[in-house]
């Protein structure tokens, strides 16, 4: 057992997880969202009998297939990391975290993999309605996969429905449904799925826009843009709606994250929402320097979003660190003190247990339970540690929000000009459509940064700090596996980009009947 | 039911023909097979259990080790890094 903790172990473990999660997430939104776009095109084909809709569905199925084949399994690396780098976390939360992940494997993955063969290879071979049903099942299966992961992630942000067992050092599940149906889990699922839909909509718009610029596959491109722009517009509006739910949940459960998202240092009643701002780089918690160099604010909006009242008090970073008696906000120091009492009581409980002192055990357990809510704070070294990196979260959040609103306008304009049959004349908009795809990926990544880095210093909010969640291994092992996973996953990313580019350049199969005769469709 | 099963047989036949004729499908299949070999064979089957996975004799052993960590770290751990 190590006597002191290797600091680089925490940093490398975090970096490795961030790297693998980011690369894994490059594949997910396209799989989740494009499956619905294919299903919509196929539905139009079944309803109208128009062969061109079938061609649209087939083409996007091919790109979906490339993304699925290359992306599938990249999540396995994340699963391995839980065991190698985060074994304390895995043990402590395994009872909670394991259940949704097992549900994913049993329900979602089997649903997806059962119907995917019919979706890819059923053209002209099975009943059209059964084929369409299979495509929808693949789409639902992909969403269901995301659901269980997001339920587990939501629990990390809002740990409910469990109790910590000091005998086993584990969280034990009390109520599965309160975890699955918590407002945080429901909202996180809807918000994330919505963001996947936006990414996939702009993936389709980007490829179709490129065809229009090249004056190739015009009909396919226009029809694809109609579906994608409607899908993207509705998804963008839906994400704004669920984003409001996210803001409310964060305000209630993670006020430090909200303060970081808004760069709010001093809490105030009727707090405004920063629409655009540049933080003062020299600003620190507790000093008198101005928070912002420049900012444009929507008055009272943050109070309304976070607390459903225009005049509600929104605590800032200073209030959370130093406390605010007027608004009954406990200081971080007090929480840390209570946390240390909980940890000392836990140690006394284990010692009494080893000695068989039942009376001392009960006394210590009672003291532990009284303060266990603050247990995680007992690990923190200084009060400021309760805050995440404020500039990083502030800019990530605002990049996500600004891009999210821009997508509404882009999708609406795309739809309008396509319906008016004027889109090809506006090359600038086609270029914006092309660039919107990487921007949608960036917005999606920024959202994850807000969610995950914004939760720091915790892996399990308020209970388990990230630094206590790691395994007792040398950082050398983590550094070695970091480079190994990076090479492995980047090889897949390069393969994805290369194969996808070749397939897009080649375009759809113009011989629609070829596959029906048992031939190739590429 | 017979129609349904016949359809499934057709799907299987079509899949085989598809893989025979499509270069893209062959490339993707090779990528999937290599991934299975690396992820499950090398990483999960060899590297992880032998070298990466922390070793415990039993669940109780693991539970005790985690508890030791939970109780030890507050005294030894000071992280001033950027979260």
Image (tube, rainbow, N blue to C red):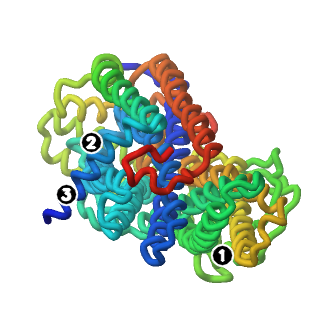
Find numbered disc 2 in the image and state the secondary structure of the residue it sits on: loop
Find numbered disc 1 in the image and state the secondary structure of the residue it sits on: helix
Residue lying at 67% horizontally and 82% vertically, measured from the top left:
A310
Q: Distance between the Cα atoms at labels 2 and 3?
A: 54 Å
Residue lying at 51% horizontally and 45% vertically, measured from the top left:
A27
As rendered, which of A93 and A80 lies closer to the eye? A80
Q: Distance between the Cα atoms at labels 1 and 2?
A: 39 Å
Which chain does tag 1 point to? A
Res A221 quadrant in image? bottom right
Q: Quadrant of the N terminus of chain A?
A: top left
Q: Is residue A197 left or right of residue A85?
A: right
According to the picture, the residue beneath numbered tag 2 turns out to be A169
> From the viewer's perspective, is residue A15 above or below residue B53?
below
Q: Which mark is residue A303?
A: 1
Which chain does tag 3 point to? B
Q: Position of residue A363 (x, y in %)?
A: 23, 51
Q: Are marks 3 and 1 on the same chain?
A: no
According to the picture, the residue beneath numbered tag 3 turns out to be B6
Q: Which mark is residue A473?
A: none
Q: Position of residue B77 (x, y in %)?
A: 49, 31
Residue lying at 77% horizontally and 68% vertically, measured from the top left:
A423
As rendered, which of A479 and A484 lies closer to the eye? A484
Q: Position of residue A160 (x, y in %)?
A: 35, 61
């Amino acid at each position: 057992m190590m006597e002191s903790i290797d600091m680089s172990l925490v940093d490398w473990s975090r970096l490795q997880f961030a790297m693998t999660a980011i690369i894994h997430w490059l594949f997910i939104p396209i799989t989740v969202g494009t499956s619905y776009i294919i299903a919509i095109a196929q539905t139009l084909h079944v309803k109208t009998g128009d062969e061109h809709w079938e061609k649209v569905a087939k083409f996007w199925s091919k790109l979906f297939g490339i993304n699925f084949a290359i992306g599938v399994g990249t999540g396995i690396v994340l699963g391995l990391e839980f065991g190698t780098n985060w074994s304390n976390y895995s043990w402590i939360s395994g009872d909670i975290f394991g259940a949704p992940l097992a549900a994913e494997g049993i329900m979602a993955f089997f649903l997806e993999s059962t119907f995917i063969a019919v979706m890819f290879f059923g053209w002209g071979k099975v009943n059209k309605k059964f084929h369409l049903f299979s495509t929808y099942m693949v789409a639902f299966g992909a969403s269901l996969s995301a659901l269980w992961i997001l339920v587990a992630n939501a629990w990390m942000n809002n740990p409910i429905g469990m109790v910590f067992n000091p005998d086993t050092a584990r969280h034990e599940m009390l109520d599965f449904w309160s975890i699955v149906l918590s407002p945080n889990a429901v909202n996180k699922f809807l918000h994330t799925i919505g963001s996947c839909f936006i990414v996939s909509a702009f993936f389709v718009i980007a490829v179709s826009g490129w065809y229009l610029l090249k004056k190739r596959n015009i009909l396919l491109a226009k029809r694809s843009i109609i579906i994608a722009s409607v899908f993207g517009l509705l998804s963008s509006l839906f994400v704004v709606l669920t984003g409001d739910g996210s803001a409310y949940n964060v305000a209630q459960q993670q006020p430090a994250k909200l303060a970081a998202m808004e760069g709010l240092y001093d809490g105030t009643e009727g707090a405004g929402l920063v629409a655009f701002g540049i933080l003062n780089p020299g600003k620190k918690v507790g000093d008198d320097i101005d928070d912002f160099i420049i900012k444009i604010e929507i008055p009272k909006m943050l109070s309304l979003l976070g607390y459903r009242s225009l005049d509600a008090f929104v605590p800032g970073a200073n209030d959370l660190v130093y406390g605010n008696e007027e608004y009954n906000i406990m200081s971080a120091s007090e929480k840390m003190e209570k946390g240390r009492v909980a940890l000392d009581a836990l140690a006394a409980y284990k010692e009494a247990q080893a000695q068989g002192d039942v009376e001392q055990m009960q006394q210590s357990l009672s003291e532990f339970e009284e303060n266990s809510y603050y247990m995680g704070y007992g690990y923190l070294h200084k009060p400021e540690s309760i805050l995440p990196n404020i500039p990083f979260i502030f800019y990530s959040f605002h990049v996500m929000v600004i891009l999210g609103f821009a997508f509404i306008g882009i999708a609406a304009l795309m739809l309008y000009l396509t319906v008016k049959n004027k889109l090809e004349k506006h090359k600038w908009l086609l270029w914006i459509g092309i660039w919107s795809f990487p921007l949608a990926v960036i917005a999606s990544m920024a959202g994850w940064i807000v969610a995950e880095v914004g939760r720091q210093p915790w892996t399990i909010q308020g209970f388990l700090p990230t630094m206590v969640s790691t395994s007792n291994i040398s950082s050398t092992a983590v550094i070695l596996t970091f480079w190994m996973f990076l090479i492995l996953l980047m090889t897949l990313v390069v393969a994805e980009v290369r194969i996808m580019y070749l397939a897009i350049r080649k375009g759809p199969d113009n011989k629609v009947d070829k596959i029906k005769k048992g031939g190739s469709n590429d | 039911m017979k129609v349904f099963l016949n359809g499934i047989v057709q799907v299987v036949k079509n899949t085989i023909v598809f893989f025979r004729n499509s270069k893209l499908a062959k490339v993707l299949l090779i990528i999937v097979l290599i991934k299975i070999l690396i992820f499950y064979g090398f990483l999960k089957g060899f590297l992880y259990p032998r070298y990466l996975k922390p070793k415990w004799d039993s669940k109780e052993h693991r539970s005790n080790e985690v508890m030791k960590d939970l109780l030890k770290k507050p005294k030894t751990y000071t992280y001033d890094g950027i979260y």
